[in-house]
Amino acid sequence: DIQMTQSPSSLSASVGDRVTITCQASQDISKYLNWYQQKAGKAPTLLIYDASNLKTGVPSRFSGSGSGTDFTLTISSLQPEDFATYYCQQYDHLPLTFGGGTKVEIK
Amino acid sequence: EVQLVESGGGLVQPGRSLRLSCAASGFTFTDYAMHWVRQAPGKGLEWVSGITWNSGSIHYADSVKGRFAISRDNVRNSLYLQMNSLRAEDTALYYCAKGRYGAWSGFDFWGQGSLVTVSS
């Protein structure tokens, strides 16, 4: 199975900060990576697909980059509604696997 | 508007069975693969199983293979998960999720989940 490692597992940031979350795959997955946001007590929602494509309706302050084994989710200016847990997920090989999550908390 | 509504969860003893259902609406059900993803209390996300639009391809996580069975009814726009020989480690919130394009490219909409608790 492909292992997905996210870092950090949690971070504290202030409104307006630039936030970067990384995700590393245990083998080359090309661009086959999604990012999800999960707010407390809610279902996850898709933010970014194919490593860098923003889902329709997602604010442009979110961006994704990377290919191969190393990927990044960036929030350019953190907003109050962005405090949540973020997960990466690969779909290059079955089983589909997720990273362990990064919890973004208010500083 | 896409809607996925799970049902069938509850408290069950170890070794017993439970069947989850997911009612889908707001999209052409037969155009998409469907999946089950679970989340143990306070933990991360784990893909459980997926099924293509015509049930022609089905896959499972190793953790549930041989115990769980996914199925769909394209007339009723419904997805199912039959869970047998349940274990304490199967305790989780089970989400029904709509596949993106293709069968195995992730999930673009999720239901609110159905809680399964396995305990004596």
Image (cartoon, rainbow, N blue to C red):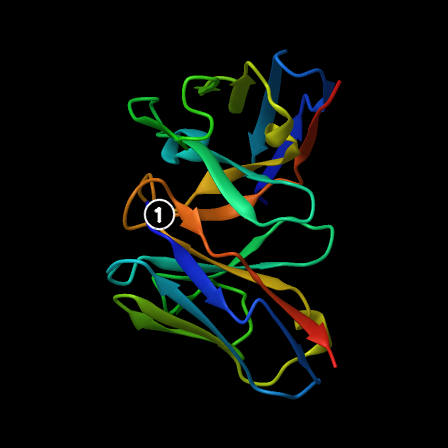
- The image position of residue B78, as x and y in percent, is 53, 23
Viewer-nearest residue: A15 or B108:
A15
> Residue at point 61% right, 39% down?
B3
> Residue at point 30% right, 26% down?
B57
Viewer-nearest residue: B79 or A18:
A18
> Residue at point 68% right, 21% down?
B8
- The image position of residue A44, as x and y in percent, is 59, 52
Subunit bearing disc 1: B
Q: Is residue B66 above or below residue A85?
A: above
- The image position of residue A97, as x and y in percent, is 41, 48
Query: If the image is split into quadrants, where does the N terminus of chain A sit?
Result: top left
Residue type pointed to by label 1: Ser
- The image position of residue B116, as x and y in percent, is 68, 28
Q: Callout 1: helix, strand or loop?
A: loop
Q: Quadrant of residue B38?
A: top right
> Residue at point 72% right, 56% down?
A40
- Which residue is under mark 1? B105
- Total marks in image: 1
Query: If the image is split into quadrants, where does the C terminus of chain A sit?
Result: bottom right
Residue A99 appears left or right of B86: left
